[in-house]
Image (cartoon, grey):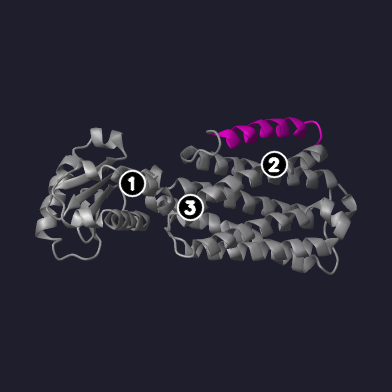
Amino acid sequence: MSPDLYPITGSLRDILFLMECIIAFIFLEFAIIFYIRIKNKGKELKVLQEKSYFWVFFGYSLRWIITIIADYQIYDSYLRILMINIGYTILIISSLFFIYIIEKYKIFVKQFLFTKIFIIMIVGYICILFISLEYATLISHLFWPIFIIFFVFYFKYMYSDLYKKGLIADFKYKFLEFCLGFFLIVVGYQLTLTSMIIVFGLIGRLYGDILQLIGIFLIFLFYISIPSFSEFDWQEKICSVLIIHNSGLFIYERIFDEHNVNNNEFIVSGRITIVKMLFEKITKQKEALIIDQGGQIIIVQPGRFIYGAVICEENLKSLQILLKKFIEKIESIYYNILKNWDGDMKILRPIDDIAKEIFY
């Protein structure tokens, strides 16, 4: 550390102070938004990703608040380094919560792999804290590569789950916004570190703050353009998929939540409800129909020769899109068969392969 650099003075002091207060405030606002989402949703299953983002935004905001106090107000070099390490520790622990919550519902490489790596590194980091604050500050930067590698896997998951399945229009460009925003925040953060200030001076920190603000703006554009995070977790909400011919005969059924089915007679009554509904309500229906059955949802999508139904825990746009794709693909492949279907189920068995392609 170079004590001569702090507290920050000079012509750039005020603009740097203002920009970094804005950064801390924006991330705190993001954390509050996700906290409100968590409170409003209630169910644990619905808030996993909201919880993960709450922690990382909250930790990053607190880190900046502590850094601002240390870099602009503290004259004692030891006290400043101590506060900087407190800020790093908060950010590292909040990043651990982020990774743990994401890995709780999605496995990357191996279950809780990155969580375990982070815990081991945190234990080592805390041990070094008691030996040397300055060494601990240097060691704290090693967490960034692991966090970035984790995000690469997370980006890959989002891309394959939302873009390849066509759940969000133009997601490829929105996804690039998110990646670029994340990259700018990481680079900008690095430019605000003391080691970079020694090389580039305070102008480097100014550029770092500017890059972070641009990155925040891009991530904001991404979040306002995508649906609720519940849409990411559609696989956790789906209970069963059914396909019914216009004649009223069941063609196909895939049960996703065996535990839910075994402990709830909804599937049995749901079948009866769907068949009855087909002849009473849907004969003239051309658009998707949503039916709430005592806390569980039936999404019905009519086709030309068949009707598809998804029984799920929450009405999600993503499930409506996937069901529509499922119906369209079945009718495209089996058009001539369904047009004059004689009730032969064997010829329709490959529908299961289409279901695995769409819903897995």
Provide the residue span drawn in magenta.
112-132
The residue that label 3 is drawn on is 35
Secondary structure type for disc 3: helix
Secondary structure type for disc 2: helix
Residue 358 location, x and y as percent? 37, 49
Q: Does residue 310 appear to the left or right of 67 in the view shown?
A: left
Residue 56 location, x and y as percent? 58, 49
The residue that label 2 is drawn on is 143
Which sits in the foreground, 24 or 173? 173
**Quadrant, the C terminus:** top left
Q: Is residue 298 visible?
A: no
Secondary structure type for disc 1: helix
Crowding near the residue tagged with mark 2, few <14, some 14–19, many ≥20 C-alpha atoms within 10 Å = some
Q: Amino acid at mark 2?
A: Phe
| Disc on the earlier residue, 2 or 1 | 2
Q: CA distance from mark 3 to mark 1?
A: 36 Å
The residue that label 1 is drawn on is 355
